Amino acid sequence: MNTLVTVFAGIPLEGLHGWKRTAFIFEASVICGALWHMTFRPHDSSLVGMSAGCYALMAMHMADVVMNWSQHKWRFPRVLLLIVMIVLDVGAGMLAKPDDVTGHAAHFGGYLSGLIFGVWFVRNKKVTKCEQVLKVVMLLIGLGCLGFCFYRISLWAPSSLWDDGVPWCWARQAYSYTYFGDQEWHCLRCPDDECAAGFELVLSASLSPVSYIACGMAAFIHRKLFRFGVS
């Protein structure tokens, strides 16, 4: 699907604005989409694909219509089609299940950055004062979003803007017959430093780093350390 969107949305843009502008907006928006994903979904283990760039191409079409409004003959059908596509994606994100792995935050970040970059870099056939003001507004929005993303990413422990109840990402596997009563590896996850310190103190010799994928949320939290005097 991403490839089809890239081909059908990207080829017209290359013809209108050149491959350099199109490639720059695509690649820069992929990076911005990843930043947005890190801001809103810091507990996700990975982010793959180029969906943010595809949404940036759709946003670039929107920016092209806005910046060259009077020059476009089919501006209203293009805007309507783009709005329908946005509404469908937002609706899919709102109806998604809690375990959905689709990077909706990256989609939004890619579209927003594509719109900002598009306003600045698409070919503008006739510059007006309103368009100059719009450029300044979009620049301020872009700088504000970039600063917000870097601020959220710098915080520790990481927290999700979607769900503040999601514990932060201290995750280990532990092997202890004394504690667990069997000879299996168990997944551990802690929501705070106190919990993590307790496990590291009691089970330090048997702890092993583990990925988010190896230990799902349903099998994660073990906090009963009462036999060791830790809670």
Image (cartoon, rainbow, N blue to C red):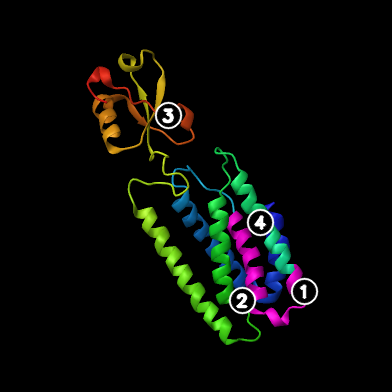
The residue shown at (56%, 42%) is 101
Q: Dot 4: few (<14), some (14–19), or many (≥20) neighbours within 10 Å?
A: few
- Give how far apart the Cα atoms at labels 2 and 4 are: 24 Å
- SS for dot 2: loop
Query: In the figure, residue 118 lies in which quadrant?
Result: bottom right
Location of mark 3 (residue): 220
The residue shown at (47%, 51%) is 40
Q: How many marks?
A: 4
Residue 218 drawn at (x, y percent): 48, 29
Amino acid at dot 2: Val
Q: Earlier in the sequence, mark 2 or mark 4?
A: 4
Q: Magenta span has 61?
A: yes
Which residues are drawn in magenta?
51-77
> Which numbered tag is attached to residue 87?
4
The residue shown at (32%, 22%) is 224
Q: Earlier in the sequence, mark 3 or mark 4?
A: 4
- SS for dot 3: loop
- Give how far apart the Cα atoms at labels 1 and 3 are: 54 Å
Residue 113 drawn at (x, y percent): 54, 65
Callout in the foreground (3, 2): 3
Amino acid at dot 3: Phe
Q: Earlier in the sequence, mark 1 or mark 2?
A: 1
The residue shown at (56%, 60%) is 110
Amino acid at dot 1: Trp
Location of mark 2 (residue): 122
- SS for dot 1: loop
Residue 212 drawn at (x, y percent): 45, 36
Q: Magenta span has 169?
A: no
| As drawn, 188 above or below 21 | above
Q: Earlier in the sequence, mark 1 or mark 3?
A: 1
> Which numbered tag is attached to residue 74?
1
